[in-house]
Image: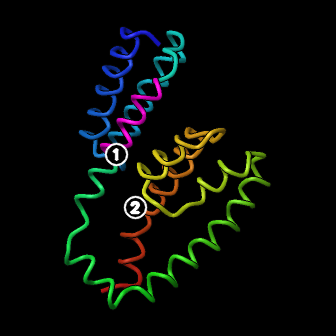
Amino acid sequence: MDITKIFLTLAIGTLGGLAGYKLKIPAGAMIGSLGAVALFNMFYGSLGKMPGSVMVGVQIVLGTALGLSITRGMVMELKTAWLPALIIAGTYLAAGIAVGFVVAKVTGWDLLTSMFSAVPGGLTDVVAAAQSVEGVKPVNIMVIHSVRLVLVLLSIPVLVKVFGK
């Protein structure tokens, strides 16, 4: 991909990301940029593929941002939370594996893409991790996680109203 296409892709993605963010779409910056670049590709021809070095840079920025959320206090909390954390993580892992097999069977997708689609993580984090694995289809994962996120965000207020006080 030549430098002009890289900058054009980033400009289109930035405009779409800002629009998604301003519209308060869940994960709007990512979904907006994805949509804008995808629409451009569909109607004006492929922009190509981002160079691996750009993807490494994106992962470094994402890892840095996640690292900033870890504090000494958070680590100290692990003294009391390690057992529930292991139980929850083990349950999520088992459920994710089971759901991954179901997704692969229902959709015909490869098992790795299906497993990433079933991971109960954050949209941005899961897609970023998936992009570093050969053969995984990040767009499929983005679609599944976006639908999951929207359904959860729409259902939580209803569930709180029905069951909570």
Q: Which mark is residue 25?
A: 1
The C terminus, quarter of image: bottom left
The circle drawn on residue 104 is: none
Distance in Å between CA atoms under marks 1 and 2: 11 Å
Compared to residue 45, the image places residue 146 above or below, namely below
Q: Quadrant of residue 157?
A: bottom left
Does residue 64 appear to the left or right of 4 in the view shown?
A: left
Tag 2's secondary structure?
Answer: helix
Residue at point 44%, 87% (across, down): 84
Label 2 neighbourhood size at 10 Å, few (<14), some (14-19), many (20+)?
Answer: few
* Picture layout, residue 111 above or below residue 164: above
Q: In the image, 149: left or right of 81? A: right
Amino acid at pointer 1: Ile
Q: Check the image and report above or below for 132 versus 51.
A: below
Instruction: Check disc 1 and report its element: helix, strand or loop.
Output: loop
Q: Which mark is residue 153?
A: 2
Considering the whole magenta stretch, tell me its main secondary structure: helix
Q: Find residue 37 and report its horizontal and vertical position in percent.
A: 44, 24
Q: Position of residue 12 (x, y in %)?
A: 35, 21
> Which range is magenta?
51-62
Position of residue 14 relative to residue 60, above or below, is: above
Residue 69, given in percent of the width and then of the height, sits at: 24, 62
Please tell me which of labels 1 and 2 falls first in the chain.
1
Name the residue type under label 2. Leu
Q: How is the image coloured?
A: rainbow
Label 1 crowd bin: few (<14), some (14–19), many (20+), radius 10 Å: some
Q: Is 72 or 45 nearer to us in this picture?
A: 72
Q: Nearer the viewer, residue 38 or 77?
A: 77
In the image, taking residue 15 as reference, residue 139 lies left or right, namely: right
Residue at horizontal 44%, vertical 32%?
34
Tell me what residue is drawn at x 27 percent, y 84 percent: 77
